[in-house]
Image (spheres, rainbow, N blue to C red):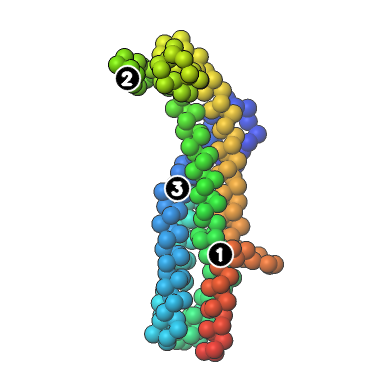
Amino acid sequence: MSELSLRRDPIRLVLSRGPWAAAWYLLGYLAVGWALFAIALSTAVVGAGLSITFAGLPVLVAAAAAIRWCADVERTRLRPLARIQGTYRQVTGHGIMAQLRARWRDPATWRNVAYLVGMFVPLLALDAIVLAVWWVFLAGITLPIWYWAPWQTIHGVRYHGYDLGYHPNGPHGPGGWGLYVNTLPEAFAVAAVFLVLFLIFNYAVVATARAHAAVARGLLGRSRRGRLLLTGASGLHDHVQHLMTDNG
């Protein structure tokens, strides 16, 4: 992940592809992560629910294929930052039960579930918070261009300017706090502060993308020996194992 290097000064960092590639990667997860989560969770739950009858077993096989497809989408998104490849067990034998055993006894399937379902909420929350703060700082740099556009009417008087605080009685009225930006010098001063914050916060954006990519690489990459992370999937795992044992 050389593009996401943190070994740069703030100016060199903002002029590199790092923060912009990181922001695009995080934004992409906000755009497609919820859809992949919904597909993976719904297909797995429906498949497990219908598997109480033999007619539902093909649905459980299809659910594993859908989960694999969702994982491939994430691997494709990760490709500009790190190339990973999922390794799955080959189906040996014929029939539905052979496919069911091969797919749902494969640790790679459960690692896909762990990423797509178990890690969805923490990754979504982290990405959304970091991107929201980053976007506020970026927008604040452009304040001198549009500070005059917002307006509000208070006690019959119309005030133009951007309120960075709370001023119920106007920019100079009592009971207010914060800064009411309604002059060009004030807008430039605030924009300079936002610029400094933006340059510093780029490190947080890049670090967040690196952490997210590390989770994806660890769960969607090649299988590793040791204990698997099956957050949010253990109940379904036990059910499928019991099902295959009864039908084996």
At a point 65% along the width and 34% down the height, the residue shown is 7
Helix, strand or loop at label 1? It is loop
Image quadrant where one finds the C terminus = bottom right
Is label 2 in contact with label 1 (beta carbons under 8 Å)?
Answer: no
Q: Which residue is mark 1?
A: 232
Residue 120 percent coordinates (x, y) = 51, 55
Q: Nearer the viewer, mark 2 or mark 3?
A: 2
In what quadrant of the picture does the N terminus appear? Answer: top right
49 in relation to 164, above or below: below
Residue 209 in picture, x, y percent from top left: 56, 44
Among numbered discs 2 and 1, the one appearing first in the sequence: 2
What residue is disc 3 on?
A: 30
Residue for badge 2: 153
* SS at badge 3: helix
Q: State left or right for residue 153 relative to residue 8.
A: left
The answer to whether mark 2 and mark 3 are in CB contact below 8 A is no
What type is the residue that disc 2 sits on? Thr
Position in image of residue 63 (x %, y %)? 44, 72
Up-down relation of residue 5 to residue 188 (above or below): below
Inspect the image, locate mark 1, and give the three-letter code of the amino acid beneath it: Gly
Taking the spot 42% from the left edge, 21% from the top edge, the residue there is 168
Inter-mark Cα distance, 3 to 1:
20 Å
- The answer to which image quadrant residue 231 occupies is bottom right
- Residue positioned 62% across, 63% down in the render: 229
Q: Give the class, few, some or many, for how many residues have Cα within 10 Å of label 1's Cα (few <14, many ≥20).
A: some
